[in-house]
Structures are given as C-alpha cells and as structure tokens.
Amino acid sequence: MNYETSIQPGPAHFGPDEALGPNPTDTVPAEAAEIDRRRMIVAAVLIALVLGLAWWLMHRGGTATETAASTSQAQTVSVVSPGRTTVEGIVTASGTIAARREMPVGIAGEGGRVVSVLVDAGDWVRAGQVLAVVDRSVQSQQISGQSANIAVQQANARLAQANLDRALKLVAKGFISKADIDRLTATRDSAAAQVRVAQASLGQLQASTARLNIVAPASGLVLTRGVEPGQIVGAASGVLFRVAKGGELEMQARLAENDLARLAVGVSADVTPVGTPRAFTGQIWQLAPTIDAQTREGVARIALAYDPALRPGGFASASIKSGTTTAPVLPESAILSDPRGAYVYIVGGNNKVERRSVTTGDVTPQGIVVRQGLSGNERVVLRAGGFLNPGDTVRPVVAPAGRGG
C-alpha cells in the first residue's frame, strides 16, 4: 500500500535569511574584522619603529667605536703657537774681497828693458814712488847731446849780441849803415831763439826719459807685481802692478734683488773671510744701481779697513743688518717645501691637519721668520710634518717652551 507522504516546507528547510528575514546581529563580525585589521597595522608600525631604532642604535654604536678607534690610532705630534717676536733682520750674503779703488799701473813711455823692480806685492808705496826702472842708456846719450847743443846755441847767441853791440857804437860815426844794424839784430834774435829751441828739446828728452820709470800714481798697497828684471816692456805690455789706493778694501756681496731693496748705504755688516773665524766690521758704501738680468742679483759693496787677514780675491760671507721686524718665528723643522713653495702644517680645532702656505724671511738664531701666512696664534706642527697629509686626525701635544727643530 502506497502511502504518499507530503512534506510541507517549513522553516527548517530554508536559509536564515529566507526563513527569518534580516538579523540585526549580522554586523558584529564585520566590525570585528575591521578592528583586527587596524590592530595588525598598528603592530606593523610598531615593529618597523622598533627595527629602525635598533638599526640606529647599532650604527651609532659603530660610529662611536670607529671614532674611538680612530682617535686611539691618531699620530701624536708636537705643536707650538709661535706668537709674534721682534727680531733684528739679518741678510746673509757671500762674495769676494777686493780693493775698494784698484789702480792698474803700466808703462807710460816708449818702453825698453826692465833694469830693476823696486817693490813687491804687499809693500806700501807713496805717490810718485818708483816701482820699476827701464834701461835708459840711449836716452841718456840723447840728453847729453842735446845739452851740448844748447851750449853751442848759447855761444852763438852771445856772439850775435856782441856783434850787435859793436855795430851800434859805429853807427854814430857813419861806419855802419842802418841796414847792417837791422841784419845784426835779426841774427841776435835768431840765435836766442835757437837757444830756447835747444832747451825745449832737452826738456822733451828728459821728460820722455823720466817716463821710463814706472811710478805709483797714489799711495797705497801693492796687490800684484807682473814684471821682472830683464823683461822687455812697452805700451802693449798691459798692467805691470796693481795698487789698492790707500790700502782700502771692500767685500763685494752678491744679493738677491729683494734683499738688496731692504738695505741702505751706511748699514753695518760683519764680514768673515773663508778659513778664519774672525769677523771684520764694515759698512755698505755703495749699492749696485743695476740688477744682473741672468742671476737677478745685485752687489752691495762693504767698505773694510786694511788688515793682513783680508786678502783681495778671497771668498767671504757677510751678515748685514736690515732693521727689526715683528713676525712669527719657527724652527727649521716646522717649515716644509715642495714645488708649490714653503708651507707648514697646522692643527685645527677638530684636531685635523691643514696645510698653510707661508712666505719665509730672515734666518735668525731664534729660527726662521715667517713674513706671510701665519698670525702666530695657530697650532703649528713642529716635527713629523713629512709623514702627515691634509685631513689627517692627530693628537697634538704642546711642545715645551724653547724647544725647536
């Protein structure tokens, strides 16, 4: 028997929406999901901040460690603040000793064979003193002959005067004409003139003979002797003696043009010849008016009194006073140089090395004067400058006062 069962649709067979309609509690899950999403975003931001902070702390610690390591490995250098010092400027120069006024002496006459030389190098002579004698045997004979000729002309003049005197006594008696008187007067005048001519010729011969002697033109010191007995001398023989006038000497100091410009006539100088520790005091008496175009140097002539230790032609050094100056003074070890010029290393406030170009001046017992480039307040590296480079970090140690390079 078949029974048909009819099943009526009920609420249990439909979805909640279909069976019950809208449910107010359905919005709760959506709000919870939104809250979870926000929490996840906040957590991600916090994690990022924590990671960033950790990275910063790690790198900060590393930089501090590196800085500490760099400081511990920095080179220790001695530094000094030179300040400004007033020093007496000294210009150092070299040159030769020479006669202040050198007089070359040669033969003035026609020359001949030297009979004798009366002086030697190192002798003092007076003006007009005979230095050497040249043979004059021929000239002596000429002088004797001319002296005899004068005697003849004088005799002729006396005879002419006597004839004129007798003729004048006979004119009044009419024995002598006026024309004869005129002729005798002319003869007398001619004879007198011949006497004067002969005397002039004798004087010429004597003067020419006197010039055979080689004489000193002025008093002074004989520097060189270039003639010996028996030597034939003449106008082409050149200089036979050199005489320092008055024995005055000088040093011809060669100076760079910038140093020459700092000096003046009358400035004192100490000259030390090579081979002796003794210094001689002199004064500049002349500064060269020109500069050598090749060497860019000029000459300062320092007058010196005679002394046997000063030998003309010898080499010498001079210390010339050039006034006072106020500037930083550094030891030689602090000043370096390269193709770009002189420079020093200074330590800045961050203990980093900086290069500073400088212009140096005089070298004094205290050190080298820095004319430009430093104010004197900087911390200048005294030593180890050759092992430094600009930008290096160093540990500066102030050098004790008085310690130099």
Image (cartoon, rainbow, N blue to C red):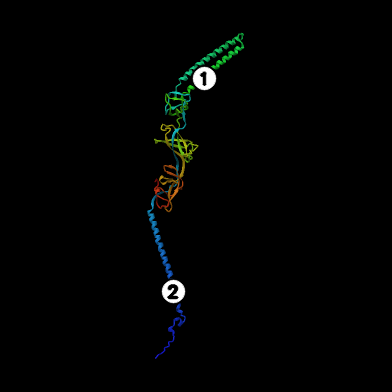
Outermost residue to the front = 1
Measured from the top left, where is residue 351 in percent x and y? 42, 53
Q: Sort mark 2 into few (<14), some (14-19) or many (20+) by Cα contacts within 10 Å.
A: few
Residue shown at the point (56%, 11%) measured from the top left:
163
Whether the residues at callouts 2 and 1 have beta carbons within 8 Å, the answer is no
The circle drawn on residue 250 is none
Outermost residue to the bottom = 1
Q: Sort mark 1 into few (<14), some (14-19) or many (20+) by Cα contacts within 10 Å.
A: some
Measured from the top left, where is residue 358 in percent x and y? 45, 46
Measured from the top left, where is residue 288 in percent x and y? 49, 36
Which residue type does callout 1 highlight? Ser
Q: Secondary structure at mark 2?
A: helix
- Total labels: the figure holds 2
First reached walking from the N terminus: tag 2 or tag 1 = 2
Which residue is label 2 attached to?
33
Which residue type does callout 2 highlight? Ala
Measured from the top left, where is residue 42 in percent x and y? 43, 69
Q: Secondary structure at mark 1?
A: helix
Which residue is label 1 attached to?
201
Residue shown at the point (45%, 49%) measured from the top left:
356
Q: Quadrant of the N terminus?
A: bottom left
Q: Quadrant of the C terminus?
A: top left
Work out whether residue 212 or residue 230 is closer to the camera in this orientation and state it: 230
In the depicted structure, whether residue 150 falls above or below residue 318: above
Q: Is residue 145 visible?
A: yes
Residue shown at the point (54%, 12%) measured from the top left:
159
Work out whether residue 269 or residue 114 is closer to the camera in this orientation and state it: 114
To which quarter of the image does residue 45 belong? bottom left
Q: CA distance from mark 2 to mark 1?
A: 154 Å
